[in-house]
Amino acid sequence: MMEQKLRQLLDQSCVVGGEVRCFDVLDSTNTYLKELALNGAPNGLAVLAEQQTAGRGRMDRRFQSPKGMGLYLSVLLRPELPPERLLPVTALAGVAVCGAVERLCGERPGLKWPNDPVLHGRKLAGILTELTVDGDGKLALVLGIGINVRQGREDFSPDVAEIATSLRMEGLAVSREALAAALLRELDKMYRALLAGELDPWREAYRQDCVNLGRPVQLLYPGGRKQAVALDIDEEFGLVVRLEDGEVTVVRSGEVSVRGLYGYVE
Ligand code: BTN
């Protein structure tokens, strides 16, 4: 990542990305930023790496992060809000990713509930939000986002190649610096909306982006699975589903996973 090029593209008025630090190699931008958070790093700090040697996904999975191919970015947020108001952050970050890609590429990805950006039915990006407590006992959020930008099929391991895609593979050419700048700008808007409690437009965008609605989904519980149809998104960004017996219920991220259309499993 060319740090100078990125800096030129940044909007100085933004809190998110108000300070950026770029590295050639990190184990994981999330792991590194959590350490910085403990040592008093500023609100909005963004950390980027050209390559991650131990990029992490949800559920203890790896996030493949080959050198120079993807955008690997984490931002530190210190919202002074009660914890329950932080719950939608990962969903909102999904909308921010869709917005940044649309702005630059002219094509908007969808979201596989709760927050996997997908393009043409394949996984384009991943989001990992981690909560940490800093030295003063205050909550801090580390929001990690990886977007596949320049990978070809050969850059993914065979199992991941079945389900993943990159912007380039979908015919969308974009510089990682421009994408990083656009993403930081969208995340800044998102952060302001979160603080102000003005989430209605974001909820509506989430509803529009969610590719599961109106479709069959499998709900994966620790002990088994249930068939359902996804109906809607509720006030708290939960997924409203109708089970086979007709019961309508809401699933919240973290409680169950959804196996959607695309054959990949959370
Ligand atoms: C997932 O798809 O399960 C989430 C993947 C999140 C990957 C990003 S890349 C930047 C940041 N650092 C990490 O180690 N993970 C996140």
Image: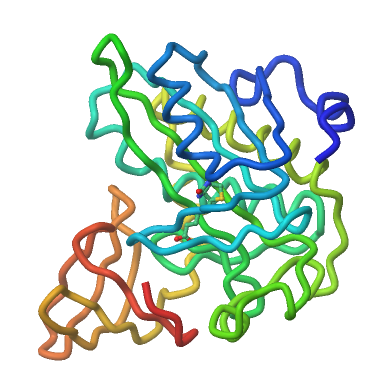
Q: Position of residue 154 (x, y in %)?
A: 74, 79
43 lies above or below 241: above
Q: Nearer the viewer, residue 64 or 90?
A: 64
Residue occupying the point 63% across, 58% down: 65
Q: Position of residue 86 (x, y in %)?
A: 32, 34
Residue occupying the point 68% across, 25% down: 21
Q: Quadrant of residue 29?
A: top right
Q: Quadrant of residue 88?
A: top left
152 lies above or below 85: below
Instruction: Judge from the rendering whether residue 22 lies leftward or rightward of residue 47; answer left or right.
Output: right
247 lies above or below 137: below
Residue occupying the point 28% across, 23% down: 133
Q: Quadrant of residue 26?
A: top right
Q: Nearer the viewer, residue 26 or 130?
A: 26
Instruction: Judge from the rendering whether residue 138 lies leftward or rightward of residue 182; answer left or right.
Output: left
Q: Quadrant of the C terminus?
A: bottom left
Residue occupying the point 51% across, 45% down: 93
Q: How many marks?
A: 0
Q: Position of residue 10 (x, y in %)?
A: 78, 26
Q: Quadrant of the N terminus?
A: top right
Q: How is the image coloured?
A: rainbow
Instruction: Judge from the rendering whether residue 144 lies leftward or rightward of residue 141; answer left or right.
Output: right
Q: Position of residue 116 (x, y in %)?
A: 49, 63
Instruction: Judge from the rendering whether residue 78 lies leftward or rightward of residue 102; answer left or right.
Output: left
